[in-house]
Image (cartoon, coloured by chain):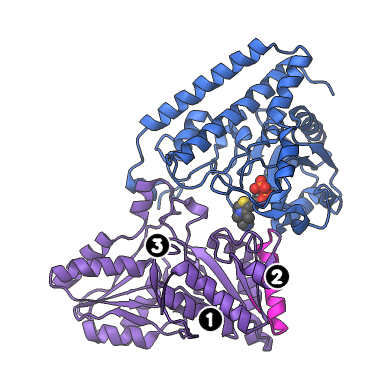
Chain colours: A purple, B blue
């Protein structure tokens, strides 16, 4: 076991997969010689050379298409969107080509799209978005979003070894803020399985990525008030761990869904529908969604604070739900 | 084409103002007084100042993030921009955005979307509207050498050429896109060659010579107004600071920086004005004193301005409130 940062976990997963499998290679803007805008790939260029850590032109759609092409030939490209926001430039290749290859003609497309996402960094509307929701309506993609170093490493390894296109959303707020124990030996975290990060019996908070930490803080406060909170870290958004979600709802009977994308049209609606379709009888109160405000991510601190879901939002909602 | 004394002084004023203003913003960033990042145009000010000064008031610009000079030339005041960096309510976007992600339709400045070259097709569309309405106006867009690798760049160039619309595409070729040198960005040395494929007349100019940029832009605008369609202007320069102010730019050879330091566009213009007797040392000092005062006032204005209310975040998402 070693205690490492979330960023280091991602770096190590790349390094280990590259050293184990010659077909794994990286592409993206400034990821080579420079080591990446966030320094995730630092050192890999020196270790693996310029044809395994490729500095691309400023062409998200182009290098995503190129990754798809290489993957169809059996390679395992991992590409980096410098900021997740720029994934919009590659939208067409991801949605039109990667997601549909296997279904249409059996073309296996094992690409991984690493995207640093999320707010709380005063990045404004183009450097803070959470684009995962844009892709939830596109069958054929897998979407993961780890909340801690252990999952970050294990999920990235699974993503690289997976035969489908995987969108890997890494939260830039967590990069150097979150540390955790990670085994020294090889391990993976399966795609499609959630994890209960805190056991509880009064209500369930279903969440993922940076919001797991918001939920944990809220749970501490609620504990002091005698409210026992269960937290489900989804880890994977597509496919959703339906069984894990439903089991927890059956146990606690009350649900909050917490996510950082704008509330409307986000994953919360999907999960709420799933719960009400399958375990409606077990519910002892309304399903509450807490998302970001339905507005582009603002820059100024008071506005960004207002935009993002926070601990208080969860605590207030939980109290309301318990009193229901 | 000749250039008049008033134009020369105007160019100089904005050059110097841009340099001083961004230097101040950099200093404030280092003091931790600005949130988020700071990207400056240090060493490249002549480009945005040159192209913006060549335009008429009715023309429209779609700048990119190293176009501080253009924003100021178009009339977005340093007060508003400084307040923007501070995230204040009085900033150009009222706290919605930081740095130069600004726009003001009344001043003919389109807001810059961070996604590079996204502004090129938009500028082509602005020009299309001028053509449809029979207006003698020009649209101008700017991006970096890196931005010209994007599909949107190529789609815009193609459309504009096919439609023969009055747009001038400016490219700030500072030889690096973040850490990526031109040689890894494209297999040609002159970005201007990209215009050939679209049958768009192109020039490569010395981007550190504000007069040259200005005159090239004047010629391109003239062509556009005469109904002869788009032009492309590649301005060769060097980015003298890091990609953003937290980047030490170790990937740029120091000798290259030394070489370009000698071509500093501000000093060069000063020398030009002095040696051609357009202005005296005293004139230049007076201009500078005025600029320093303006910037100090902007800082005070920004400092004293209130932050927006948190709830302002959800206001103004729709033009027709939902
Ligand atoms: C589509 C897109 N991808 C990535 C980025 C992140 N990014 C911001 S600036 C930059 C480099 C820009 O280089 P260039 O276009 O040459 O302009 P310069 O900074 O050199 O003026 C990158 C990669 C972006 N803004 N837009």
Examine the rendered structure and indicate whether residue A115 appears above or below residue B265: below
Q: Is residue A60 magenta?
A: yes
Question: Is disc 2 placed on a helix, strand or loop?
Answer: loop
Q: Count neighbours of disc 3 (C-alpha within 10 A) and say few if under 14, some if 14 to 19, many if 20 or more.
A: few
The circle on residue A177 is 3
Q: Is residue B116 visible?
A: no
Quarter of the figure that contains the C terminus of chain A:
bottom left
- Look at 50% across and 25% down and name the residue there: B295
The quarter of the picture where residue A39 lies is bottom right
Q: Secondary structure at mark 1?
A: helix
What residue is shown with label 1? Answer: A157
Cβ atoms at labels 3 and 1 below 8 Å apart: no
Q: Nearer the viewer, residue A127 or B181?
A: B181
Indicate the position of residue A38 as horizontal and vertical percent values. 53, 60
Chain letter for the residue marked with disc 2 in the picture: A
Q: Chain of mark 1?
A: A
Q: Is residue B3 left or right of residue B295?
A: right
Circle 3: element type: loop
User: Is circle 3 on the same chain as circle 1?
Assistant: yes
How far apart are labels 3 and 2 at the CA level? Answer: 30 Å
Identify the residue at image location x=68%, y=27%.
B266
The answer to whether any part of residue A68 appears in the image is yes
Residue sitting at x 82%, y 49%: B195
Task: Give, as a single range, the part of the protein colored magenta.
Answer: A58-77
Residue A49: give its label.
Answer: 2
Residue closest to the eye, B195 or A219? A219
Which label belongs to residue B25? none
Please report contact status of discs 3 and 2: CB closer than 8 Å, yes or no.
no
Q: Main secondary structure of the magenta part?
A: helix
Of callouts 2 and 1, which one flags the residue occurring earlier in the amino acid sequence? 2
The chain to which mark 3 is attached is A
Disc 3 from disc 1: Cα separation: 22 Å
């Amino acid at each position: 076991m070693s205690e490492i940062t979330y960023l280091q976990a991602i770096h190590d997963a790349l390094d280990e997969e590259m050293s184990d499998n010659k077909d794994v290679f990286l592409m993206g803007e400034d990821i080579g010689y420079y080591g990446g805008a966030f320094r995730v790939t630092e050192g890999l260029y020196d270790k693996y050379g310029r044809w395994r850590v490729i500095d691309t032109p400023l062409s998200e759609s182009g290098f995503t298409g190129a990754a798809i092409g290489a993957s169809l030939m059996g390679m395992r490209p991992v590409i980096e969107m410098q900021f997740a926001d720029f994934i919009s430039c590659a939208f067409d290749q991801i949605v039109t080509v990667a997601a549909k290859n296997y279904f249409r003609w059996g073309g296996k497309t094992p690409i991984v799209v690493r995207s640093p996402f999320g707010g709380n960094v005063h990045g404004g509307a183009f450097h803070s978005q959470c684009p995962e929701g844009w892709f939830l309506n596109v069958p054929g993609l897998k979407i993961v979003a780890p909340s801690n170093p252990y999952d970050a490493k294990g999920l990235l390894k699974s993503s690289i070894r997976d035969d489908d296109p995987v969108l890997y959303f890494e939260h830039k707020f967590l990069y150097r803020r979150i540390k955790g124990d990670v085994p020294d030996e090889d391990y993976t975290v399966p795609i499609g399985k959630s994890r209960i990060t805190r056991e509880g019996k009064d209500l369930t908070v279903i969440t993922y990525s940076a919001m797991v930490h918001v939920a944990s803080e809220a749970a501490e406060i609620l504990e002091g008030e005698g409210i026992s909170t269960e937290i489900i870290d989804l880890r994977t958004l597509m496919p959703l761990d339906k069984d894990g979600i439903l089991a927890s709802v059956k146990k606690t009977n009350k649900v909050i869904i917490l996510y950082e994308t704008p509330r409307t049209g986000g994953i919360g609606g999907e999960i709420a529908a799933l719960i009400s379709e399958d375990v409606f009888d077990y519910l002892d109160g309304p399903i509450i969604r807490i998302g970001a405000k339905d507005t582009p991510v603002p820059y100024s601190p008071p506005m960004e604070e207002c935009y993002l879901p926070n601990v208080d939002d969860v605590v207030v909602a939980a109290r309301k739900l318990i009193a229901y | 084409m000749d250039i008049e004394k008033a134009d020369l002084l105007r160019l100089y004023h904005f050059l110097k103002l841009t340099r001083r203003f961004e230097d101040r913003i950099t200093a404030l960033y280092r003091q931790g007084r600005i949130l988020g990042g700071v990207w400056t145009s240090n060493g490249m000010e002549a480009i945005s100042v040159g192209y913006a000064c060549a335009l008429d008031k009715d023309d429209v610009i779609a700048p990119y993030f190293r176009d501080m000079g253009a924003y100021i030339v178009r009339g977005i005041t340093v007060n508003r921009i400084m307040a923007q960096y501070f995230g204040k309510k009085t900033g150009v976007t009222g706290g919605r955005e930081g740095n130069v992600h600004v726009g003001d339709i009344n001043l003919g400045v389109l807001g810059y979307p961070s996604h590079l070259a996204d502004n090129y097709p938009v500028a082509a569309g602005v020009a299309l509207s001028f053509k449809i309405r029979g207006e003698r106006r020009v649209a101008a867009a700017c991006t970096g050498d890196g931005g010209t690798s994007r599909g949107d760049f190529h789609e815009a160039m193609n459309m504009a050429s096919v439609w023969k619309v009055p747009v001038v595409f400016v490219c700030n070729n500072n030889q690096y896109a973040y850490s990526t040198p031109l040689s890894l960005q494209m297999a040609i040395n002159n970005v201007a060659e990209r215009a050939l494929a679209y049958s768009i007349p192109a020039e490569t100019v010395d981007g550190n010579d504000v007069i040259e940029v200005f005159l090239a832009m004047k010629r391109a605008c003239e062509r556009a107004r005469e109904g002869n369609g788009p032009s492309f202007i590649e301005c060769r320069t060097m980015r003298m600071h890091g990609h953003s102010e937290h980047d030490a730019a170790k990937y740029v050879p120091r000798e290259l920086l030394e070489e370009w330091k000698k071509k500093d566009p501000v000093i060069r213009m000063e020398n030009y004005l002095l040696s051609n007797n357009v202005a005296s040392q005293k004139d230049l000092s007076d201009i500078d004193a005025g600029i320093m005062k303006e910037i100090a006032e902007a800082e005070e204005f920004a400092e004293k301005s209130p932050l927006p209310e948190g709830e302002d975040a959800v206001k103004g998402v729709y033009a027709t409130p939902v």
